[in-house]
Each structure stands twice: as structure tokens, then as C-alpha cells.
Amino acid sequence: MTKCIRMIKGYKVTLLFGLPTTWVTEITHVNEQKYFVNEQRIGPYKLWHHEHILEEHFEETKVIDVVSYQPPSGIFGRLANNILIDRKRNQIFEYRFTKIEELFA
């Protein structure tokens, strides 16, 4: 059963040149033990929609991330995405993977 819930979380994230910004996401949909979706409400992206899909594999849980995002600021944002933003986004997921391994290994 899919539930629509409202859970809002704010984070401080460091962007380009070490500048901090606030990133507020809202968990908008939950299907327990199957997936949940969070969307940006305030933050560095023009659009951020993140699906966390959970699949069971031989007594382990596999997390599949489906991220749709759009950088800010038109052409300048697209250039920044190619140079910096995409790399930073990948670092976020690498950090999460490392932390999950530490906690559940």
C-alpha cells in the first residue's frame, strides 16, 4: 500500500567554493519495504526527485537510486553540472554507500 506522508528534513550542505546552503527535502511517498520518494523543497537544484527502491536479494536489501534533477541557473547551471555538480552528486552517494557499509556490514 502506498502512503502519502509529509516528512520534511533540513540539511546544511556545502556547495561550490565551500559555501554552505540549506537543503530541505520532503518525503512524499512511501510504500513500506518497497520504496520511498524524497523531493527538494528548498535547495541548490531547480528540481530534485529521488526514488529509493528497496529489493530483497538473498537475505540482503539492495537499494536502487533513481534521481531526476535539474541544475539551477539555465546554461550556467548546465555548465556547472558538467564541471562540478555531477561529481558532487556522485560523492553524496559514495558517502552514503560507505556509511551504510560501516553501519550494516
Image (spheres, grey):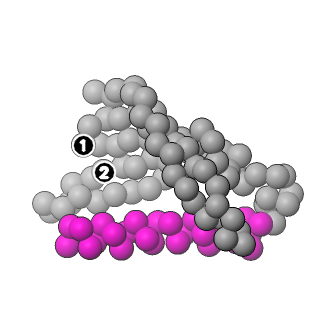
Which element carries disc 1, helix, strand or loop? loop
Which secondary structure is most common in the magenta stretch? helix
Q: Is residue 101 left or right of residue 53?
A: left
Residue type at tag 1: Gln
Mark 2 closeness class: few <14, some 14–19, many ≥20 residues within 10 Å = some
Q: Is residue 61 left or right of residue 24?
A: left
Task: Determine which quarter of the picture holds residue 57.
Answer: bottom left
The percent coordinates of residue 104 (x first, y second) are 21, 67
Which is more N-terminal, label 2 or label 1? 1
64 shown above or below 99: above
Mark 1 closeness class: few <14, some 14–19, many ≥20 residues within 10 Å = few
Task: Determine which quarter of the picture holds residue 16.
Answer: bottom right
Q: Is residue 37 left or right of residue 43?
A: left
Which residue lies at the image location 36% right of the left edge and 49% below the top edge?
Answer: 53
57 shown above or below 11: below
Seen as rendered, the residue at the extreme right is: 75
Residue nearest the observer in this picture, 92 or 2: 92
Residue 15 shows which numbered tag? none
The magenta stretch is 80-105
The percent coordinates of residue 92 (x first, y second) are 50, 66
Residue type at tag 2: Leu
Residue carrying label 1? 33
Residue carrying label 2? 54
Taking the image as drawn, is residue 69 in sight?
Answer: no
Quick check: is 104 in the magenta stretch? yes
Which element carries disc 2, helix, strand or loop? strand
Q: Is residue 63 left or right of residue 43?
A: left
Which residue lies at the image location 18% right of the left edge and 61% below the top edge?
Answer: 60
Which residue lies at the image location 64% right of the left edge and 48% below the top edge?
Answer: 43
